[in-house]
Image: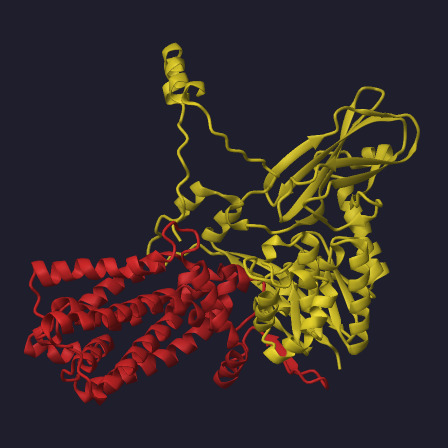
Amino acid sequence: MSTSPGQPARWELAHDHGFHAAARVQEIWRYRRLVWFFARQSFVSLYAKTQLGWAWILIRPLAPLVVGALVYGGVMGVPSVEVPYFLFLLVGSIAWNAFDGPWMWGGRGIELQRKLITKLYLPRMILPAGAMARGFIEPLVYIGVLLLMLPYYRYSDGTWYLAVSWDLLTAPLFLLLAASLAFSLALWTSNWQARARDVRFGLAYFLSFWMYVTPVIYPASQVPERFRAFVWLNPMATVVEGFKGAIFGWAFPPAWAVLLACGEVVVVFLSGFWYFHLLESETTDKL
Amino acid sequence: MKSLTVQDIGKRYLLTSATRSKRTKATLDLKIAKVPLPWGMKVAPRELWALRNVSFEVEPGTILGVIGPNGAGKSTLLKILARVVRPTEGRVVGHGRVVSLIELGAGFNVDLSARENIFMNAAMHGIPRQEVVDKFDEILDFAEIHDFVDSPLKHYSSGMYLRLAFSVAINMSPHILLADEILAVGDMAFQERCLQRVAEEGKRGLTVLFVSHDMSAITRICQQAMWLKSGKLMQFGDSQSVVAAYTRDAMESLAGGPDTDAAQNARLLEIVSVRLVSPDDGRAIGAVPVDQDLLVRIRLQIRRPMRVRCLVDLRVKNTYVFRSPQPEFHAYEERGYYDVVARVPANLLAETSYNLDVVVYVEKSSGRTYLVNAIDVLSFTAYGAPYESEYRKGVVMPRVEWSVQAVEPESAEPGPSAAAGERAEEDPAADSVPTIEAPARAER
């Protein structure tokens, strides 16, 4: 639909209108401001009707971190290479939560706006993208905690632990990879999450399983040598280990693992884009 | 160049057991149906064609009325054109920007200010920010809300809300505007302004599809009309004749029901029309603000002296809101036309669509009684200020007054548990009285 005052643009609707990826991308670009609107809306309403209000933003991510450090690091004595276990878990959690939260929230994008999309057309891919923003709260809180803890360890242990080198600049790239994977998977799941609520509960279960096979609460070096190669098939293992490597100055995952992870994200994204397109128009019939 | 060309459009819904259960609440059936079937066996889903073989063309600058009883496919047609649902078959070719006002203020967020909502709504229609900046004052001018531009919509009156919604839509310079009942709501002066504006835009080539149950509005506003009935296009043409045909058909189907002797009743009395009328000037209206009395006017043609009692049922889909009978039979001494008016007090209805049934009991001097049914004779929308709607629910929303008062402990009345205990002594069966538990809040 053009905005020119002259001849109005022609459009056509039919059941099967084919898959025009470039046109879809153009359309999404035209509606891009909605991503910010939906993201903001989700922040405003997040803790609107709770007693503790914004305090929840801190409590929710911190509680599992503290409990996890006590149980895994304290009681079970999981090794954490050469840094305190709390710091080890904190850095791993930043990377993991840059994937976990955005996927779970992004997947709910359509479900949360189901009233709107039965009244009004908008490119629905905007919805997972906007809703995803809410999932970034937890990794951001963890990053804040990290910035507070580093001077503390400098004071108590006499070392920063943070390795200041060019490698540190790769840290945000790993987070970006995690978020891209989360968005790609949200494209796969969000239509189903809108149609049946069970999907979300199943996914939460699946994600906790995925976290245990990812070196978040333990270092990848704990995995027996003969299984090590299989670990890198999991793109999140590469992300988490890579992020830890960037922060602490440890060895990165092998280059082939990084390339594989990037390749996996691209494949999941492109197939997710196509699959989303396949399902989206039927979803409004099934809400 | 046509503004809109619709070719053989059809929309099929498959009612699987799950979707069917939502409508009929057949929980038991659902449980039976959910028993897993042997491999390879399937329950064929029931098909429902909400719309089929509908074709028409609209010239730019036309205001086209869409009429028909509930479930005729009017909303489905609008939703297809708005790209909300995809047609199962057929093809639509259109020209230019489509803006939908399918639900009043869909996409408005009552917690945000008018300013923010204007930008958000424009973004939802994919309109560039600069265009909204240019049009911003014009939008406020038309809506007459300059002083409130930064206050959240939840503090708006229903009139302001309505004006804003319309103003945003019309100022997005649509080529095709899809309006569901909206042009029929609001006060007369605002309606006039809307129509004037629509007419101006019509010269520019604006096409309007206007769905309404208000036949007087259709004939007043629209040059052309289309009549849909159970998903089929019955008639398309100039609005006067289409409305006439539709009204005739509706009245014919009203005259009889399975348990009435139509011929007999027709000789006694006829329900000429059932209308919602404005309390101010008696004009027929298609929607009513929740804070205004609802007047249902039943026009009867009495063919011989007799006693008649009317009864009005108000429903939301299949849920009865209430049934209100006329207090007693009214004796009509003379033949002629009579208006029976039922006034439902303001601040009772919720912001939703209602259906109205009318039943007329006729008592002849011989003492025999007859029944004339007019089922689903009217549907209308109640609208109002959507203030803090988060926790409001239900088919009615009366204005409930709440109060809190501090009390001394000694003045406290005996608790319900003590009363229940006494009752239990007298009647052991009282134990089986179910206790009401606090409803569980659904997890989000």
- Along the line of sight, the residue nearer the viewer: A222 or B7: A222
Q: Quadrant of the N terminus of chain B?
A: bottom right
Residue B227 shows in this picture: no
For the point 9% across and 60% down, the residue is A74
Name the image quarter holding residue A67.
Answer: bottom left
For the point 89% across and 26% down, the residue is B305
Is B92 on the left-hand or right-hand side of A270?
right
**Among the chains, which one is red?**
A
For the point 25% across and 87% down, the residue is A259
Name the image quarter holding residue B422.
Answer: top left
- Against B114, is B346 above or below? above
How many numbered marks, from 0 up? Answer: 0
Extreme-top residue of the structure:
B426
Is A50 on the left-hand or right-hand side of B226?
left
Percent x, y of residue B153: 60, 57
Is B365 on the left-hand or right-hand side of B122?
right
**Among the chains, which one is yellow?**
B
Percent x, y of residue B397: 60, 41
